[in-house]
Amino acid sequence: MNNRKVKVHSGDGVFNQSKWRDLKVGDIVKVEKDEYFPADLILLSSNYEEAICYVDTMNLDGETNLKLKQALEGTSNLQEDSSFQNFKAVIRCEDPNANLYAFVGSLELGDDQQYPLAPQQLLLRDSKLKNTDFIYGVVIFTGHDTKVMQNSTDPPSKRSKIEKRMDRIIYCLFFLLILVSFIGSIFFGIWTKKDIKNKRMKRWYLMPEHTEVYYDPDRAVLAAILHFLTALMLYGYFIPISLYVSIEVVKVLQSIFINQDLNMYHEETDKPAHARTSNLNEELGQVDTILSDKTGTLTCNSMEFIKCSIGGVAYGRGFTEVERALSKRKDSYFGRKMKNDQNVAKAAETKSTIKGFNFMDERIMNGNWVRQPNANVIQNFLKVLAVCHTAIPEVDEATGKISYEAESPDEAAFVVAAREFGFEFYERSHAAISLHELDLQSNMKLERYGY
């Protein structure tokens, strides 16, 4: 990780590539979209005029929603590399600590103006820049002084049941080896002690005259000890060391098969399976106990716009995944009710191809809401969906389609729903939001600015 590269200001407004390991406190770095922050940084500016940026902190706290960060007003105008040619500032801040959500400091510019620093300007290492083309930041903590390293602990050692069972077998075999060697050495010592008969060796065929300790009746105890050590080496094949090697080779091959398994490929995020370790291959999927709280830890954090209530009238005939599962059960009341309506049943079997939008109601879909008696109320409701959010539009240059990046998936679902109803949010500036809006009178799309 420390060999990754980032753009660092080398002087005269020029940024050159440098490794993370070479960063020093006070360096000004330029981090681009979807890159990780190489150290703890103070945000100076971004490509947005209001100097904001969105940060993914999933590696730090596990949260998938994006965090909004904003630079100080005094440095928000530094939006080009050349702006840092004569830039000078002094930062005074707290000592390195492990608190991820607290930061105290101040930034003093050349004109003797001081600005207070808060966690709103702090970009932590191991978090990722999202929905922002680039940011400029100054390094305040590096290496083991960063907050993520202050919070890091050694990972626990995880061993599979097979490895633990093998260990018990090895212990038993090792105990058996010692027992056999010990018993053999005792009998060898006894026989060596009683080996002389009529001043001659009974075991003459072992040629005891060629040894100094072995087979010497006067040194039988020492001979028994040496025999014990010899037996340990001779019977050492009891311990199947090659079994460990064979199992490790099998696990490595299993990891290769896991990485190439097409059934474990996630098409939505374009990510295949990746085995980072081979310790627990044989126990994958064998869930024994689940410990969870009630905050939705096991959910996929996917939001869909299904139903809404406008002016006291409920709209929407979409169905959730749970309702679709219930509809397939013949004995359920919900299933019998859906079968009575062919359109509803057909809608339940199909799922919308638009991510975040699972709404079905012919009364307001396809511009039909303009013919409703409360059309003004519906129009204002859809305007609110398209305007009241913090999402950022991204236009695909090849297809011209607009996608949205939001802090949370529920915000993205609201904006997508407004787009499908005819109120397409397509541009955000510092002071206004622009829409392609469906006009109530002419029933045509118009461009509206200044929301």
Image (cartoon, grey):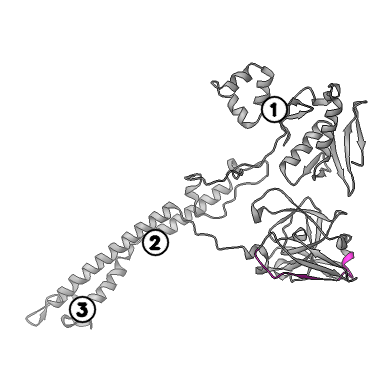
Residue wearing tag 2: 241
Q: Amino acid at mark 1?
A: Gly
Q: Are marks 3 and 1 in contact (CB under 8 Å)?
A: no
Q: Amino acid at mark 2?
A: Ile
Residue wearing tag 1: 318
In the picture, measured across the screen, residue 193 lies left or right of residue 422, that is left
Residue drawn at (75%, 41%), measured in percent from left and top?
411
On residue 221, the disc is 3
Magenta residues span 82-98
3 or 1: tag closer to the N-terminus:
3
Q: Nearer the viewer, mark 3 or mark 1?
A: 1
Residue drawn at (92%, 37%), measured in percent from left and top?
448
Taking the magenta stretch, the answer to whether it contains residue 93 is yes
Q: Residues within 10 Å of mark 2 (few under 14, many from 20)?
A: few
Above/below status of 26 relative to 245: below
Q: CA distance from mark 1 to mark 2?
A: 61 Å
Secondary element under disc 2, as helix, strand or loop, is helix
1 or 2: tag closer to the N-terminus:
2
Above/below status of 63 relative to 42: above
Q: Nearer the viewer, mark 1 or mark 2?
A: 1
In the picture, measured across the screen, residue 237 lies left or right of residue 308, that is left
Above/below status of 298 relative to 44: above
Figure quadrant of residue 225:
bottom left
In the rendering, at what x and y percent does residue 210 appear? 22, 82
Secondary element under disc 1, as helix, strand or loop, is loop
Q: Amino acid at mark 3?
A: Val
Q: Residues within 10 Å of mark 3 (few under 14, many from 20)?
A: many
